[in-house]
Image (tube, rainbow, N blue to C red):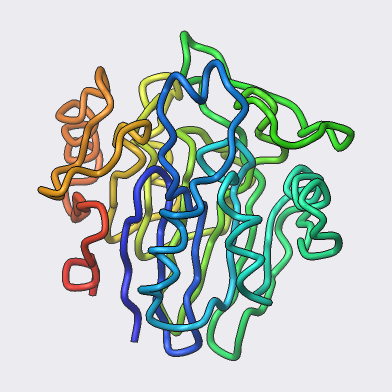
């Protein structure tokens, strides 16, 4: 049994018989002014509401890179579970700042990590997309000597990974940023490909080459929501401007007409569309 849900930004939740796996959970959705001009802290009231409705225990939390909208909430989530935390040296530095020493399994890339008898993860080395004026935002490592709370710019991306998760016989790949290293994807294929939309035009071959390399049956566009805004009670996803979503879809249909495209809604299950 696998239930899959988009939690907003780059967050994906897998509910399995072994427990819950989260990738890049960002529930706080802090406002633009706070992120740009103030020191940031996780909105623990929002995270607590999520935890209150958690259908099972955590099996793992996986972080593809350590920008604010991928890593801010993870230390607080980790305080409520003894689950396995997978990520980079920068994530380890962030956890150390929170007093959570030795909680992160630091990944170098391409290790096969067994989470349970039927679930494994490979962290494929990658690079971040050029999403702001043709540039990569906040590059480099989180400063291990920094003090909390930090400003948003302190959440540098660190090593960037594409988590590849195999659950039973289904393989998922998670691109939390619109970029990849072609040579690192040699030999990797998947059934379901989560594709970050923002910045997709800045990477040559993002749609055509990527899909040709990993051969997905299903593409799930995501991370296109305006995560500086709360999710409305209507459930309608607030969309980031200037994404050219129709162009993104047209490119996929042009190069891979047989690939199924599933547009998710935040906090709505996708499993009926994926399996």
Q: Residue furthest left?
A: 234
Residue that sits furthest to the top in the current view: 133
Give the image quarter of residue 271.
bottom left
- Quarter of the image that includes the N terminus: bottom left
Residue nearer the viewer, 34 or 16: 34
Residue 137 in the image, given as x and y percentages of width and height: 58, 20
Q: Which image quadrant is residue 258 in? A: bottom left
Q: Residue at x 63, y 74 (%)?
A: 81
Quadrant of the drawing holding the C terminus: bottom left
Q: Nearer the viewer, residue 216 or 66?
A: 66
Residue 206 or 146: which is nearer the viewer? 146
In percent of width and height, residue 59 lies at: 57, 78
Residue under the image location 59 percent in, 46 percent down: 71
Instruction: Tally the marks.
Output: 0
Residue drawn at point x = 60 percent, y = 27 percent: 152
Place of residue 120 in the rendered image (x, y in percent of width and height, measured from the top left): 59, 76
Task: Check the image and name the residue furthest to the right.
Answer: 145
Q: Residue lying at the far front in this picture: please name it.
A: 45
- 142 relative position to 178: left or right: right
Q: Is residue 227 left or right of residue 87?
A: left
Residue occupying the point 64% across, 23% down:
153
Q: Nearer the viewer, residue 188 or 19?
A: 19
In the rendered image, residue 188, in percent from the top left (x then y), is placed at: 53, 58
- Residue 29's place in the image compared with 112, above or below, is above
Specify whether 197 is left or right of 245. right
Q: Name the image quarter holding residue 52.
A: bottom left
């Amino acid at each position: 049994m696998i239930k899959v849900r988009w939690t907003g930004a780059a967050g994906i939740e897998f509910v399995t018989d072994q427990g819950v796996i989260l990738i890049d959970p960002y529930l706080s959705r802090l406002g633009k002014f706070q992120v740009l001009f103030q020191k940031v802290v996780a909105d623990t009231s929002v995270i607590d509401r999520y935890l209150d409705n958690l259908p099972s225990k955590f099996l793992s939390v996986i972080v593809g890179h350590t920008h604010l909208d991928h890593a801010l909430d993870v230390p607080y989530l980790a305080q409520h579970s003894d689950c396995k935390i997978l990520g980079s040296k920068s994530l380890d530095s962030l956890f150390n700042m929170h007093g959570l020493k030795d909680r992160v399994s630091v990944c170098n890339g391409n290790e096969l990590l067994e989470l349970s008898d039927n679930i494994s993860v490979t962290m494929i080395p990658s690079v971040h997309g050029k999403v702001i004026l043709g540039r990569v935002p906040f590059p480099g490592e989180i400063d291990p000597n920094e003090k909390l709370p930090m400003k948003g710019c302190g959440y540098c991306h660190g090593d960037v990974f594409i988590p590849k998760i195999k659950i039973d016989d289904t393989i998922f790949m998670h691109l939390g940023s619109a970029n990849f290293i072609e040579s690192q994807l040699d030999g990797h294929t998947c059934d379901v490909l989560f594709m970050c939309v923002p910045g997709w035009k800045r990477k040559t071959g993002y749609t055509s080459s990527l899909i040709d390399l990993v051969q997905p049956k299903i593409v799930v566009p995501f991370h296109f929501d305006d995560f500086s805004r709360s999710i409305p009670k209507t459930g309608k996803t607030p969309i980031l401007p200037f994404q050219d979503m129709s162009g993104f879809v047209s490119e996929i249909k042009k190069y891979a007409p047989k690939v199924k495209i599933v547009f998710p809604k935040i906090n709505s299950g996708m499993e009926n569309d994926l399996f």
